[in-house]
Image (cartoon, rainbow, N blue to C red):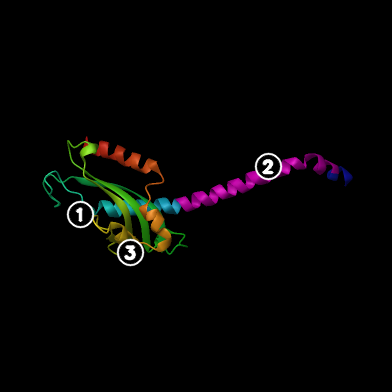
Amino acid sequence: MSSIKSFLRRHRWWLLPEFLAVVAVAAGLVYLRGDGLAEQLAAKARVTLEELQPARLELYDLQGHSHGGGNVGKVICTAETFGMEPAEAQRVEDVKVIYARYLCALVQRGTPWDYASRSSGPVVIKLTDPPYVQIPPSGDGYPDRVRALFPDTLEPQAFAGFRDKGKTVDLLKRYHETVS
């Protein structure tokens, strides 16, 4: 018995790093699980936005038309969620509302990214059938319209930019692949 105590006394300094490693792995798994739902919701938001008419996103072709024919190209988007209702949902099927930021571009042959029609900002997507998308219109009073759409706790995120800059880089890559 004393040999065990002696062993633990001499080697107890190893217990703290091992304990911290276990805690770090557990925290990482919780973090990844949460991100999994956030990424699924972001993908759902992206698809929903890409199915909207360009006029709903304030995207127009080179002649200023927002109809679905002629020179109007394909809309591609990226989205990043920052909230949902109910907040405690664990599965996509349980989510009723997605709060996200988005960036969409109108892809037209021969139009470089720098000249592409783009739209970005916060969006509320109610997951009804069909989904109901609320994008605050730009112009005078825009901040008030954003505040009216989002819960008070999410207002700072509604005015923030993308946390994951890789999402915008991926959209740019998709744009170049689609336009060529």
Label 3: few (<14), some or many (≥20) within 10 Å?
few
Q: Give the residue pinned by disc 1.
A: 53
Q: Which mark is residue 148?
A: 3
Question: Which dot, 2 or 3, sits closer to the camera?
Answer: 3
What is the CA distance from the residue labelled 2 to the residue labelled 3? 48 Å
| Residue toward you, 82 or 147 | 147
> Disc count in the image?
3
What is the CA distance from the residue labelled 1 to the residue labelled 2? 55 Å
**Spot occupied by residue 99 in the image (x, y as percentages of width and height):** 37, 58
Q: Residue at x 48, y 53 (%)?
A: 34
Residue 121 vs 165, above or below: the answer is below
Residue 134 painted magenta = no
Q: In terms of sequence position, does the residue under pointer 1 or pointer 2 come before the other?
A: 2
Q: In terms of sequence position, does the residue under pointer 2 or pointer 3 come before the other?
A: 2
Q: Which mark is residue 17?
A: 2
Q: In terms of sequence position, does the residue under pointer 3 or pointer 1 come before the other?
A: 1
User: Do the numbered discs 3 and 1 sit on residues whose CB atoms are within 8 Å?
Assistant: no
User: Hey, what amino acid is under mark 2?
Assistant: Pro
User: Hey, what amino acid is under mark 1?
Assistant: Gln
Residue 22 painted magenta = yes
Q: Residue furthest right?
A: 2
- Callout 2: helix, strand or loop? helix
Predominant SS of the magenta segment: helix
* Magenta residues (range): 6-35
Residue 117 image-quadrant placement: top left
